[in-house]
Image: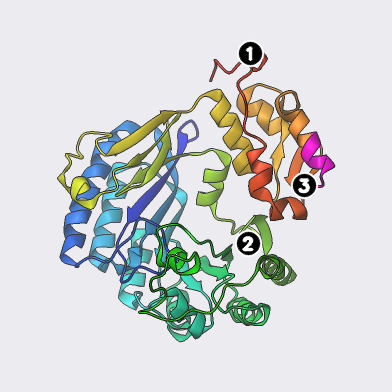
Amino acid sequence: MMNRQELELYIHIPFCIRKCAYCDFLSFAAPERIYRDYMDKLIEEIYGQSACFQESVVTSIFLGGGTPSVLPAELVEELFAVLQDSFCIHEDAEITIEANPGTLTMEKLEVYQQSGINRISLGLQSADDAELRYLGRIHTYDEFLKSYQRARQAGFSNINVDLMSSLPGQDVHSLKCTLRKVMMLRPEHISAYSLILEEGTPFYDYYCGKGGAAGAGSLILPPLPDEDTDRAMYYLIRDMLEAQGYSRYEISNYAKPGYECRHNMGYWTGTSYLGLGLGASSYTFGHRYHNVTDLGEYLSLDLTQAGAAARDIQKLELKDKMEEFMFLGLRLSQGVSGSGFLERFGQNMWKIYGDVIRKMEGKGLLRVEAPWVRLTDLGVDVSNYVLSEFLLEEKPDVGFGHS
């Protein structure tokens, strides 16, 4: 396996019990009879695509959605048997399944273990039941707790808990209570994202003046925290988690030593990934693309033909790759290094980005500790602005004609 190129697999399961009011992911409720039809097509796509990756070794698999844990145990078991048959999967591969409380049973967890899944990502979002109702979640904190305990009983020793901040009606005190409850459980990894109002969601319509219901049913929702409170929440999360031994290794991700999410690290550091299933995105052989997003179309395709579902195929030029190296690398707490840039592209990072790095350093948004360049706390607060400064204009002396 030493000479094989590393490959990550992302598998999209679009089904969920009920779509949350803030969610803009490709997900929806569907009758269970559709699950079998979808799995048949997904397996067809796996066999069709895997022929192109026989020289690769799979180092991580992420089963996301949607809510993959809504699938019956036998479908997950069948899926992983096909993956093992189709790809060269490293014996130490990180294999994650996303799960929502209320959909996990001991039977499912035992099948996950037997199928090689070694990491569970549990969507809690908040330990406050009122906040969960506002979000339209299908579970209570007590149901999350039971699911978490079941996962531990089933033998899972690598669990992520998803949290959200800046929720309707949330204040610093309620967030602190959520953090305390979660830290008592000692999960290996915690993801903590601030709520974003995404256009096309009930929350966006509700809070951006377009009217309509949000949350569960037609709840009247309390206001969202203001911008200052949002930033206070971000630093509260960081300080409380770091005090308990969690390292912030990416803007919104924290881990105990050695438990950083390898799959996401691959995304942020340029590892190739193959997306399988409805709407799944891929980055392979220097091209970025995504699968069709309409379920009826996906189910009608002949997926024995490699790439049959691929749409919007874009070849990344050297300029694009350099930009992504900076965009994604600066999200990491370690930042980007000049030596890493030179190794990846054969060019001097300071020759290409020196002016913008010095400009951002002068504003207190970047910290330079050779060979590393990192966001400061202030830079994290305005990271979208900082990262936008790393867009390149094509220049003849940079040599963008080579990849």
Name the N-terminal-most of marks 3 and 2: 2
Work out whether residue 173 can be spotted.
Answer: yes
How crowded is the residue under tag 1: few (<14 C-alpha within 10 Å), some, or many (20+)?
Answer: few
Residue found 34% across the figure and 74% down from its top: 103
Name the N-terminal-most of marks 1 and 2: 2
Residue picked out by circle 1: 396
Name the N-terminal-most of marks 1 and 3: 3
Q: Nearer the viewer, residue 385 or 113?
A: 385
Residue found 49% across the figure and 73% down from its top: 124
Asked which secondary structure carries label 2, the reply is: strand
- Tell me where the magenta segment starts and ends, as one range: 358-365
Q: Residue 49 carries which label?
A: none
> Compared with residue 329, is residue 346 higher up or lower down, i.e. above or below?
above
Tell me if 170 is positioned left or right of 59 in this view.
Answer: right
| Residue 191 position in % (x across, y down) | 56, 63
The answer for how far apart the CA atoms under marks 3 and 2 are is: 21 Å
Tell me if 118 is positioned left or right of 163 in this view.
Answer: left
Amino acid on which disc 1 is placed: Pro
Residue 188, picture quadrant = bottom right
Residue 51, picture quadrant = top left
Q: Which of 384 and 11 is in front in this view?
A: 384
For the stretch drawn in magenta, the main secondary structure is helix
Q: Residue 254 carries which label?
A: 2
Q: Which of 17 and 347 is in front in this view?
A: 17
Residue picked out by circle 3: 365
> Compared with residue 269, is residue 16 higher up or lower down, i.e. above or below?
below
Tell me if 325 is positioned left or right of 160 in this view.
Answer: right
Asked which secondary structure carries label 1, the reply is: helix
